[in-house]
Amino acid sequence: MESTSWAPTGLRSTSPSRRAASSTPPHRAAASQQPPGAPPPLRFARAEEKERIVTDIDTGTTTELGLNDLTAQLDKAHVFHSWSAQGALKPLVIAGGLGCRVWDHDGRTYLDFSSQLVNVNIGHQHPAVIKGIIDQAQLLTTIAPSTANLARGEAAKRIVDRAPIGFNKVFFTNGGADANENAIRMARLHTGRDTVLSTYRSYHGNTGAAIVATGDWRRIPNEFARGHVHFFGPYLYRSEFWATTPEQETERALRHLERVIQSEGATSIAAVLLESIPGTAGVLMPPPGYLAGVRELCDRYGIMLILDEVMVGFGRTGRWFAFEGSGVVPDLITFAKGVNSGYVPVGGVIISDAIAADFDSTVFPGGLTYSGHPLAMASIVAALDAMTDEGIVENAARIGTDAIGPGLEALKAKHPIIGEVRGEGVFWAIELVADRETREPVAPAVMARIKTELLARNLLPFVQDNRIHVVPPCVVTDSEVAEALAIYDEVLALDLL
């Protein structure tokens, strides 16, 4: 794989002097050469697409629409959106992107501190990944999963090379939900047991078993699968266990989990499914010893441990896998999002040798038409090579320690509305409260206003419940972090409560 040199300033070295001397990424140079504040140059498939004439079939009147209006009109008329009441939707129009920026058809540019759905780890439009997809498309666009394909083998090899020792096989899926679905299937087949334990504060996807394994409200209208039991995981800021220290939270959360195991009957439990760091639920950093304690309980009772790395894997925490910081090795690892930054839909299960061996002589009863799709595989190869060559994972670690973490702590010291900040790498949450003493969450209307104010200042946020998740791409620069922190500061200084 040919190496590229597009990396943002400072990505290759933690030396301040070298950071200062680094050049602007070539693929972002077009944007940087324009006057300050100007949007990146826009490209349209055809020049006449800049304006469209729309005729009302009832009245015969014509209206001239720009591409922003046309996009919104087509979306409103024909696109059915997830997790939404359709009538009230007014989605933001996005036409293009580059690095940590996206823009609409009129050229209004936003600093993307959402990474879309926390998946664009490598940034928008990385040239090496685009080239990898194009090259593969010119060679072979699709092939059945029953065949052997070089791109698929290369992608699997790169993934297992970053996994712990004892993982040598990858089952490819179309995304994170079906990755968790198939990991659950593997654990059940391996153990001969049925029940899966997962936490209430969790999200594992929106397919049959994955949505029921999810702990939040989205499981309730979807509970058709059997064999799922929920428990409370650690969350010291709002402890379910009346804990006042991380040590107490770990001890009491593990005691609670063991009682659930005993109450359900250990011999009925196939797996414990955990996000290594619960993401959508609030970037809930596990206290020291918790994951190790879960591993010990699983070993004691013969239960498989599935760690969901869909959101946190491949650089988000400043490590290839978030669980590396705990010293724990699971039995199955699920992934998606960051493995190729969502350039082509893909996910998968990294399978321990012990579980993979079960299917050497027994048919695995699962499969997907697009498992190991060549375009997705090529994007994985290109993305992981670029992330390695350009020090992108190391950049995420450094910028979390040097810029995002200290910057958010400074905001907390300044703004009483901030109850807690937590995270690592480029994976953080600002928890907002109406009162620091009672820790009452701010109202949904306040969060809606905060989101509106952030967008008005050209920052694209990830807002969830009473939190702002600070989750930029792993390629984010110090200056972009400073820009975002200044916007957060300005908005949180408003009279919000």
Image (cartoon, rainbow, N blue to C red):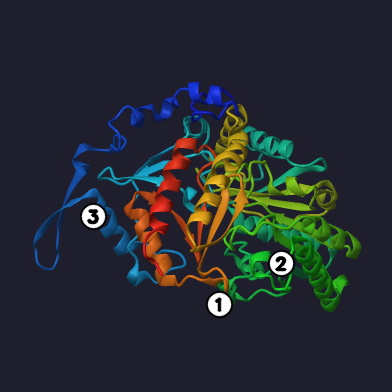
**Is there a contact, CB below 8 Å, between mark 3 and mark 1?**
no
The relative height of residue 449 versus residue 40 in the rendered view (above or below) is below
- Residue 41, percent across and down? 29, 34
Instruction: Look at the numbered disc 2 and give the secondary structure of its residue.
Output: loop
Q: Report the Cα–Cα distance between label 2 and label 3.
A: 45 Å
Residue 258 at least partly seen: yes
Write down the residue under mark 2. Answer: 233
Amino acid type, label 1 = Pro
Write down the residue under mark 1. Answer: 221
The relative height of residue 88 versus residue 286 in the rendered view (above or below) is below
Quadrant occupied by the C terminus: bottom left
Q: Earlier in the sequence, mark 2 or mark 3?
A: 3
Q: Is residue 492 left or right of residue 286?
A: left
- Residue drawn at x 50%, y 35% as measured from the top left: 133
Instruction: Look at the numbered disc 1 and give the secondary structure of its residue.
Output: helix
Q: Nearer the viewer, mark 2 or mark 3?
A: 2
Amino acid type, label 2 = Gly
Which quadrant of the figure has residue 203?
Answer: bottom right
